[in-house]
Amino acid sequence: MKYLNLFALFFVGLPAFAEKKITDGNTSCGIPEVVAVRVWTDAATKRTLKGDFVEVNGTKVVIKLGTGKTVSVVIDRLIDADKKFIKEQEAMMGQKSAANESGIASSTGPLTQLTPPASVKPYPIKGEGKKRQGGLEVTNNSNKNISKLVLDMYYLKEDGSVGKRVPHTKSGFFGNSKDVLGKGKSHLIEVSSFFMEDDTASLDGVVSEVVWEDGLIWPTWTGPTPQANDDIPVAVKILGVLGEGDVASPVVAFFNLASKGISNIFYRMTYHDADGNTLDRSNYGKQGADDWFPAGKGTAISGGKSPPKETVKIKVTVSQVIFDDKSIWKPEK
């Protein structure tokens, strides 16, 4: 990773090579933009600029600069190596997009690693004491506009261990409550010293929930509708884990098989190693807003302890369900 810079003040004749375009990004806290730099070359003039690939927009490639702005460059004007790179990126983004729609990107052994539809890039903490400031840049990698997201912010110690986890909900991305985070767009969430401890050395973050503009939510139940069971009103399964190492958290999917809505659900997660031994267990509960879990619908809940390193299987057991009408279900002992 290098700091972006431009040759020859963005080289002479830029307007003939690139069309300037301002992104919706917010860099107001003054943290320098850090990108994976690529040198792009005009085939005719051999002039170059440095920037990060964002997306292909028709006949142009969108390149992100260190200022938080983007330029749109006509692909046919680039050298063959740049054109090949663009095709490779399009193929990768196509695979990622398909994975994001399902919420599952790849398998990392017995536990599945989930890739959120939005990625997070941390910025270094600047300043001293109460004036410390950092940031987490969120980028929409899906093909739909995001109206709201939940971000788990992690305040890390010098050794990389988690000092504190703070959920953060973000909507109204650019000053207006109705603003959305468009496809390929980024937004910088400023992080002040309010939640930082004296030993906070860096930041990290994982997107744990996304609400798209059309009202659909990620993550949620995936796969076919489960068969109803007269004894158990809720079907449950592990979708996978978000994040890695100390910031990993399981994602559990539920499906309401009952004929009425659920207001509260309580469940237990048990972590097992390859020999079936119990490594750890923990209890959790979820209560949402009104009508958050209606009959015949699925949902998903993320969060909880990071699985122990030896974990190869997570078992989830529903321990209690409270319905909208205040009736309660518990498993028979």
Image (cartoon, helix red, strand yellow):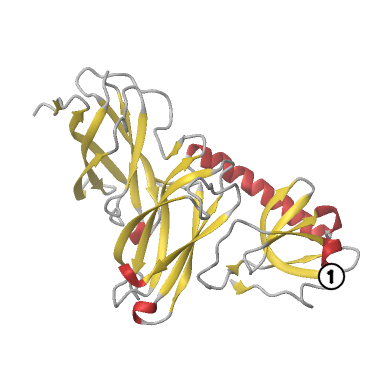
Quarter of the image for the C terminus: give it: top left
Taking the image as shown, residue 25 lies to the left or right of residue 196, namely: right
Query: Residue extending furthest right?
Result: 44
Query: Residue extending furthest bottom?
Result: 128
Residue 244 in the image: above or below residue 100: below
| Residue at screen point 76% across, 69% down | 49
x, y percentage for residue 266? 20, 38
Mark 1 falls on what kind of element? loop
| Residue at screen point 87% across, 63% down | 43
Taking the image as shown, residue 332 lies to the left or right of residue 206, namely: left
| Residue at screen point 62% across, 47% down | 93
Label 1 amino acid? Arg
Quarter of the image where one finds residue 223: top left
Residue 106 in view, yes or no? no
Most foreground residue, 155 or 36: 155
Quarter of the image where one finds residue 58: top right
x, y percentage for residue 131? 39, 78
Quarter of the image for the N terminus: give it: bottom right
Query: Residue extending furthest left?
Result: 333
x, y percentage for residue 279? 21, 52
The residue to which callout 1 is attached is 47
Taking the image as shown, residue 237 lies to the left or right of residue 112, namely: left
Label 1 crowd (10 A; few <14 / some 14-19 / many >=20): some
Residue 49 in view, yes or no? yes
| Residue at screen point 30% across, 51% down | 311
x, y percentage for residue 158? 35, 76
Callout count: 1
